[in-house]
Image: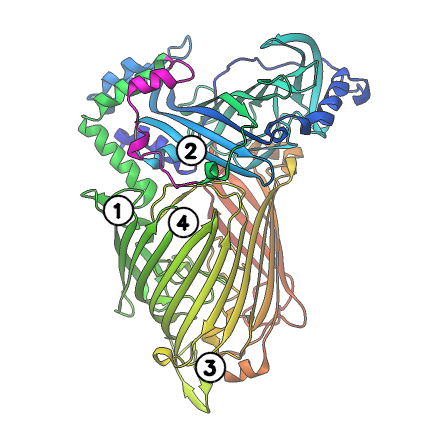
Amino acid sequence: MKYFRIIFLLLILTSVFAFSQVRETNIDEVQIKVSKKTKKKDNPAYAILQEVWKRKKSNGLSQFHDYQYEEYEKIELDLANLDSTFTRKKIFNKVGFIFKYADTLDQANHLSLPVYFNETLYKNYGRNEPDRKEKREILANKTSGLSSSDAMANTAKNLYKEIDIYDNVLNFFNIGFTSPIATDGFSAYDYQLLGEESINGNDCYRITYSPKRKDVLSMYGVLYISKENYAVVKATLKSTKSINVNFVNSFYYDLEFDNPNDAVFLPKKKYQEIQMSVFGKKENSKSITAKKTVIFSDYLFDQKLSDTVFETKVTSLTDAEYIKDEAYWKENRKEELSKSEANVYAMMDELQEVPQFKKAVKIYEVVSSGYYNAFKAIDFGDLYSVIGFNEVEGFRLRVGARTYFSANDTWRAAFYTAYGFKDHQLKYGLEFRKMFNRDNRFTLGIGTRRDILQLGAQLTGDEGIMTRSFASSGVLSSGTNFYLSSVNQVSAFASIDPFKNFTVRLDATNQTTKSALPEKFSLDFYKNNQRYSELNDSKLVLSLTARPGAVFSQYGVDRYEHSTLAPTVMLKYTQGLEGVFGSDFNYSKLQLYYYQPILLKSFGRLMLNVEAGKNFNKLPLALQNIIPGNQSYNLMPNTFALLNYYEFVADQYVTFQAEHHFNGKILSYIPLIKKLKLREVAFYRTAMGSLMERSALMNAGNQNLSAPEKKPYYEYGFGIENIGFGNVRILRVDFNWRGNYLENPNAKKFGIKFGFQFYF
């Protein structure tokens, strides 16, 4: 597989939405001469930054009633640090011509080969009064490279987070870096006033900053502060060489501001480079360099924009109306293309005709998506769900397929079938979804499945047919798990997004449930003094889901979600319908789910999760709320690591989970250990609930049902993440301790879980 080494590099980097930094650009590393003992108030840079802090809210687009401007964006991905030995490998025998398009990086004749280039022109509108509104519309788009699809374009764009230099915390890779303009910046950086300089006609103070500790998440660079109104005119931000971010070697950011109306400073140009590699942190390691340039122009203010301007429609970068010819781009491009940027278009025209290249791209697409596309119409997969194991089925094989003509398909049909080598039973799932309006995403769907599922693995679960149950089809388990159910389900749904990032969904489901292994696990219940082994449930489920700040692209029935710190709030109401299709119970259930990630400056990232729910009627075990346990060795979100399945059952419940990622803040102080670049995680999980006696008495099985009512159940622990070698540090190991209820049968006081994390 040496032939695909270059594709392997692309796959690893793009699949985690990460890429690379720059070689040295505009600035050299600054050696600060200011004495460490100099008091902050005696540093002349401190007085200047105090004035910046006072005025930082008086700069920006918020000062206008309404505004509009154009935004030109170009993104380039290069394979960097390719030496002559690498270019002579056999894998390039038929594509050696690509190196005539490469740039020489240094005196060692290392090459940089462009493999992807995208240009997009946007028009932005905004209004601050009487109510805040924003709109961003695509004017034109042009792409060339390994893939011209939305997926590559969106992956490349997702590398970069929008930052505001005036914020105290800057979000790079969903990791918080202290801004050099932060009000507490002097606790993280040393500053030195070097003098004055004219930038774009503005007289500025020139201030350098460097980290007090280079082994933490910090930067160094130069600030240019206007002498007249103390606004940032230009800033450079560069990571330290010891940056502890997975897959990333370095990054560089250059920001320029302008004063188009002599009143406020607004963004003029942004340039960012990220260098990323799976081969090591050395500067000359083979890597991918991602470059992004954004130019802002044609500002207009207070034009009394009407509400109709802000009416939006969902668009895609690949829509035909946005594909413009070269004559259009020559007229509207905000800066001339460099030689390497122009070369991408010429090189890809040649590469598209090479079978070897097409084969390599196909492998990249299969490994990154988990699906093999045939005839540009059908995806076979998911390849990562083929093998499973559980106590009922033994080893389990699952195969499936779905329709896939493009990323923006407005309808999709999917199916899977699975076979257990122990129970010799065939399982299946079928689903069809059709989206009728891409603006409000009005969608209808229908599906059915017959399968072995772990019903107690989630509190606020997904109602989808194609959802994989990890607990019933995983491979590594801690102890035996007989708590599986045989499910026959038919469902239909309708969903719509009446507002941006707000989804209303109604599911109608009929489902029969019984124990998959009744001699060891029973779901039997009493009703009208009769004992039943199979439960028939017809229900309506209304879900309201809000994702403020979430960023999606593509407009098909399935969407691509960008990596953000957006919270999730879900309110779900379930109504059982006794007598409908033979349903056994009439009941009402209300559930709440809330998830919130928070950047805490340089102290890391805190992830909070709260779930609550209540049954308003007595219900048997198959319809109850199960506090989710985890009997596998794997890390599983929103579960309790040391709870067994069905250990706690509740009519009403509240759970809380907090997990803090310190990003190496503590371990970086320990000699020798800090060289391993490990990161620490601390977590705490608790659950409290109650179970009505009449619900417990309905149970006819062999389980002694109980809830954590008298005292909350809790567990806690710590983890070590970023375990690995070089630039690939994806292993995490958690050490969990159980705080109470140790008297429960088969209770585990301590447990170790592990998993792989493909993020920064």
Q: Is 5 one of the magenta-colored residues?
A: no
Residue type beneath disc 4:
Asn
Q: Residues within 10 Å of mark 3 (few under 14, many from 20)?
A: some
Disc 2 to disc 1, C-alpha distance: 27 Å
Answer whether residue 278 is visible to the viewer in this image: yes
Q: Position of residue 748 (x, y in %)?
A: 56, 64
| Residue position for label 3 | 701
- Mark 1 or mark 4: which comes first in sequence? 1
Query: Which stretch is magenta?
Result: 312-338
For marks 2 and 4 on the same chain, the one whose residue lies earlier in the sequence:
2
Spatial CA distance of label 2 from label 3 is 59 Å
Marks 1 and 4 sit apart, C-alpha to C-alpha, by: 22 Å
Q: In the rendered structure, which disc, 2 or 3, sits on the residue that comes first in sequence? A: 2
Q: Earlier in the sequence, mark 4 or mark 3?
A: 4
Q: Specify the quadrant of the image occupied by residue 535.
A: bottom left
Q: Mark 3 or mark 1, which has the lower sequence index? A: 1
Which mark identifies residue 310? Answer: none
Relative to the observer, which residue lies in front, 172 or 703?
172
The answer to whether 173 appears left or right of 376 in the picture is right
Vertical order, 163 against 550 (above or below) = above
**Type of amino acid at the residue the image marks with label 1:** Tyr
Residue 750 picture location, percent across and down: 58, 59
Circle number at residue 137: 2
Q: Choose the circle earlier in sequence order: 2 or 1.
A: 2
Give neighbour class at mark 1: few <14, some 14-19, many 20+ (Cα, 10 Å): many
Q: Amino acid at mark 3?
A: Gly
Q: Which residue is mark 1?
A: 404
Residue 10 in the image: x percent, y percent? 36, 31
The residue carrying mark 4 is 440
Q: Main secondary structure of the magenta part?
A: loop
Image coordinates for residue 533, horizontal then vertical, percent:
39, 82
Contact check, label 1 and label 4, Cβ < 8 Å: no
